[in-house]
Amino acid sequence: METNAGSAGEDLRNTKTEIAELNRMISRLQNEIESVKGQRGNLEAQIAEAEERGELAVKDAKARIRDLEEALQRAKQDMTRQVREYQELMNVKLALDIEIATYRKLLEGEEDR
């Protein structure tokens, strides 16, 4: 009986030690879980912030593209207007050149007489 009681007492102490060790392990694992949850929360916040910055960058880029396209359109319109004005000036120049040539011929004809 004493031997059985001693053996049972020893088993009880071993079991208590094992339970205490398992409780410490559970506590450590719970702390690790909380730490990992905190890291996950931080990472999710960083991801959300990065996505927001990315969306703002895309909006900014789209606005810049729109501005550049508008500037390009204005430049094309200006160039078209300048080409038209140049053509008009060239037409006037040609008409004046023809007139000058005509007056030259008339003057040469007068000089020949």
Image (cartoon, helix red, strand yellow):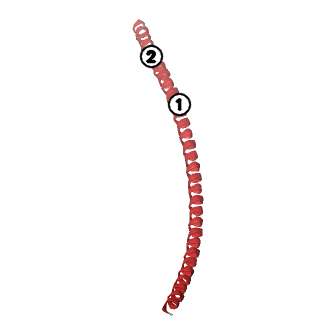
Residue 108 sits above or below residue 66 on the image: below
Numbered disc total: 2
Residue 28 sits above or below residue 92 on the image: above
Residue 14 at x, y percent in the picture: 42, 14
> Of the residues under marks 2 and 1, which one precedes in the sequence?
2
Q: Secondary structure at mark 2?
A: helix
Residue linked to disc 1: 37
* Quarter of the figure that contains the N terminus: top left
- Judge by depth and name the residue closer to the eye, 102 or 77: 102
- Residue located at (50% from left, 27% from top): 35
Residue 20 at x, y percent in the picture: 47, 16
Asked whether the beta carbons under mark 2 and mark 1 sit within 8 Å of each other, the answer is no
Res 15 label:
2
Residue 103 at x, y percent in the picture: 55, 85
- Judge by depth and name the residue closer to the eye, 106 or 16: 106
The amino acid pointed to by label 2 is Thr
Left or right: residue 52 compared with residue 16: right
Q: Residues within 10 Å of mark 2 (few under 14, many from 20)?
A: few
- Judge by depth and name the residue closer to the eye, 27 or 12: 27
Q: Secondary structure at mark 1?
A: helix
The amino acid pointed to by label 1 is Lys
Cα separation between marks 2 and 1: 32 Å
Q: Residue furthest bottom?
A: 113
- Judge by depth and name the residue closer to the eye, 63 or 23: 63
Res 27 label:
none
Tell me where residue 8 sits by quadrant. Answer: top left
Residue 100 at x, y percent in the picture: 54, 82
Residue 107 sits above or below residue 32 on the image: below
